[in-house]
Image (cartoon, rainbow, N blue to C red):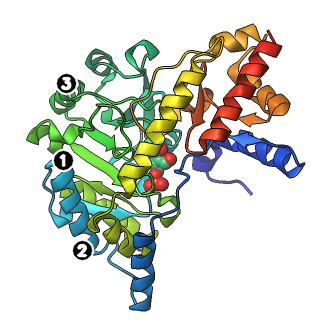
Amino acid sequence: MKLANRVSTLTPSSTLAITAKAKALKAEGHDVIGLGAGEPDFNTPDYIIEAAVKSMQEGHTKYTPSGGLPALKESIINKFKEDQQLTYAQNEVMVASGAKHALYLLFQAILNPNDEVIIPTPYWVSYPEQVKLAEGTPVYIEGKEENSFKITKQQLEQAITNQTKAFILNSPSNPTGSLYTEEELKEIGEVCVKHDILIVSDEIYEKLIYGSSKHISVAQVSEQVKKQTVIINGVSKSHSMTGWRIGYAAGRSEIIKPMTDLASHSTSNPTSIAQYGTIAAYDVESDFVEQMKTEFEHRLNVVYDQLIQIPGITCVKPEGAFYLFPNVKEAVALNGFDNVDDWVSNLLEVEKVALVPGSGFGAPDNVRLSYATSLDQIQEALTRVERFIKNNM
Ligand code: PLP
């Protein structure tokens, strides 16, 4: 059968090939350490699970409004007020089946054929694919390693054409963990207001920020920039709820409404019981997020120090999320490989360590490794990486 053009140009997730290979080796009985995880290695806290169970027992197992329960929207609105001093009305918020789905609906709602969306590299793998699925054109600008993978306002200005519709900002970033400062956000915000470009601000890692760094939403820099921004967020990473599939979007009602209408004809609504769990996640006092963050920060500091001792590897220290994105170009050359993908593949075969090649994130000299796994495992993995590099020099 001739399939739709839109799926023929889809690029499968870059983590897929390496994960499949890692799984096959594991099935053969090998001691494989996978550092590809994109989710916290914590259970969802009990108070959230209990709230979802209670909602089922009380009969909340039916359809809900497409854009989410008014009570959940209220919890999200309160969260914006408390955390970011941002005010949104009920019709300026919609709940989707994960932040990924909220982003998908957003691009479907705003893009016409050939509309351009500016995406800084390194990027999260789904952005370009979602833009293309909405018949838009991704336009890449390079977040340079020497600038902690962040783009500048000059780069942004240069990439803007009269076809530019949106700009994607992901701070803290997957895969780099970089965080934009208030000053940088102001500059970016001003450029987007000047050219009437929508800022898609993916803040899914907002709660995982380390050291003295602080998260600021670009929507906080001014009322004008807020109007020009759609914030995407969710509970997958903050409350270790990846499987619950709850994310949301906040922005102008003229954008939120068609997103909700699209959801009404596709998913109908996010899972009712997951929505009740999310209300508890936001409304019940708990130190879960703080505890998880403390553990991630501890791991980051230990693992980062070990990583940068390895010959041929350099790494910008991340300020957030739970990934390291080292540059391995020199190690790859020292080991006589042509590219990082082949090096990663060989490392898996020989030392049974699975890293994600940076090519899928638009950064072919880097690899992504997640520290959302036990410290022992990460330390052992890095010991193996070091041995691999030294043995092949
Ligand atoms: N945005 C970024 C940058 C992510 O890394 C992820 C998950 O990996 C998502 C969005 C999607 O999150 P969700 O699980 O809520 O769909």
Q: Which mark is residue 22?
A: none
Residue 95 location in percent, x, y? 34, 64
* Cα–Cα span, label 2 and label 3: 35 Å
Indicate which disc, 1 or 2, sits on the residue closer to the N terminus: 2
Residue where numbered disc 2 is placed: 70
Locate the C terminus and report the quarter of the image it occupies.
Answer: top right
Q: Secondary structure at mark 1?
A: helix
Mark 2 lies on a secondary structure that is helix
Above or below 95: residue 322: above
Q: CA distance from mark 3 to mark 1?
A: 16 Å
Q: Image check: 321 left or right of 307?
A: left
| Residue neighbourhood size for the residue with mark 2, other residues' Cα within 10 Å, grouped as few (<14), some (14–19), many (≥20) | some
Residue at numbered disc 3: 183
**Would residue 387 be seen by someone viewing this image from the given angle?**
yes
State which quadrant residue 197 falls in: top left
Q: Which residue is mark 1?
A: 84
Residue at point 63%, 17% (across, down):
328
What's the residue type where badge 1 is placed? Gln
Viewer-proximal residue among 157 and 249: 249
Amino acid type, label 2: Pro
Q: Residues within 10 Å of mark 3 (few under 14, many from 20)?
A: few
Mark 3 or 1 closer to N-term?
Answer: 1
The quadrant in which the N terminus is found is bottom right
Residue 47 x %, y %: 40, 72
Any atom of ligand 1 within 8 Å of the CB at mark 3? no
Q: Is residue 330 left or right of residue 280?
A: right
Frontmost of labels 2 and 3 is 3
Residue 12 falls in image quadrant: top right
Is residue 358 found left or right of 202 in the rendered image? Answer: right
